[in-house]
Amino acid sequence: MLAASHAPRFKPWAPVPVQPDGRKLAYMFYATDDLQACHALMAGTKIRALGTPSFIEIVALVTEDVSAQARQVLMDGGVRPLSVAAWRRTTGGQEYIVSLTKLRIFQELGYDRVIYMDSDVIVVKNLDELFNLPHAVFWAPRAYWLEDKQPHITSVLLVVDPNNELFQHLEYAIENEAQVLFDMDVLNEVWRHVAGILPSEFMVLTANLKENVDRYLFGYKSLDDRVNHTYMYHFSGGHSKPWFMDSDTIERQPDVIPLYYDLYLEYWTQRRALCSFLR
């Protein structure tokens, strides 16, 4: 675990690089439309830029609604499109109807360990060290902002050793649910007490670069210190998702750390560079 930087005799976290050991490893995303495919390509490109070696694959689980053009762009960009059936709900908001498709990462699809992440993130530090974690049903950070529900994990970042029996257990839980459950709800309902918990700085909400900053320092002495230890940001709160807004209309507030706005700028810069098929 990461130690608080103000602790006595604090030593910076020194991750051990992952080495080839016979396991088949992958970063994994899912895409049920071309926009999500674009996001997977953007995140996959950033992962490679941060130094992930070529023996670790980058994979996007794609459903039938992802176009042939988007699949080709993924392949050209070094992301393997792997076709899966969408897991569709008949209840819930439009954005959640196919969100259970994410849980297909638990299926045995040819990989021994996967690091899954939602594609609407900006990765800022290499995550390869997570391939070295010991076995657990899965690993995930806490959903730290849901203070009244703890222990409660977020499904934005998951480390999984795929197993068909685990996947079948999820299928059974959903088929017999007492109320509508979505991907994060299912994992918390079924396995919240057996999941491995990652330090919260592995996944921080963009909102906490401008709101509740002092509340969520995770033991670090300042916002700058926490920022230096953060691995990824998930777009949330405030300006919300960047694809719902015009990047040219954001007004920077002087009391907000520039990184907050820079993450939106990075999103749009990468999208324009990599995803011309969306225009």
Image (cartoon, rainbow, N blue to C red):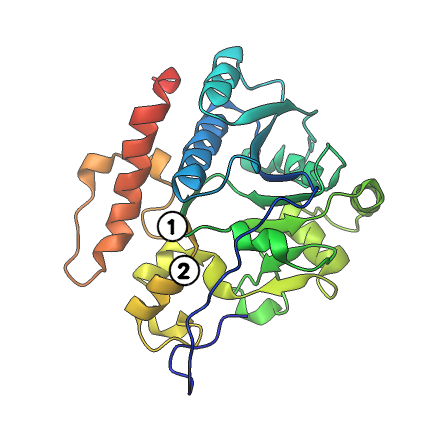
Whether residue 73 appears in this view of the structure is yes
- Kind of residue sitting beneath label 1: Val
In the rendered view, would you say 222 is above or below 252? below
Residue 68 position, x and y percent, is 53, 12
- Closer to the camera in the image, 179 or 120: 120
At x 39%, y 74%, the residue is 215
Q: Which residue is mark 1?
A: 124
Mark 1 neighbour class, 10 Å CA radius: few under 14, some 14 to 19, many 20 or more? some
Q: Which residue is mark 2?
A: 230
Residue positioned most to the top: 68
Element type at mark 1: loop
In the rendered view, would you say 13 is above or below 8? above
- Kind of residue sitting beneath label 2: Thr
Q: Mark 2 or mark 1: which comes first in sequence?
A: 1
Mark 2 neighbour class, 10 Å CA radius: few under 14, some 14 to 19, many 20 or more? some
Residue 197 position, x and y percent, is 62, 64
In the rendered view, would you say 15 is above or below 22? below
At x 33%, y 38%, the residue is 267
Residue 17 position, x and y percent, is 52, 53
Quadrant containing the C terminus is top left
- Left or right: residue 105 versus residue 48 is right
Q: Quadrant of residue 204?
A: bottom left
Q: Quadrant of residue 274?
A: top left
Where residue 52 is drawn, which disc sits there?
A: none
Contact, CB < 8 Å: mark 2 with mark 1? yes
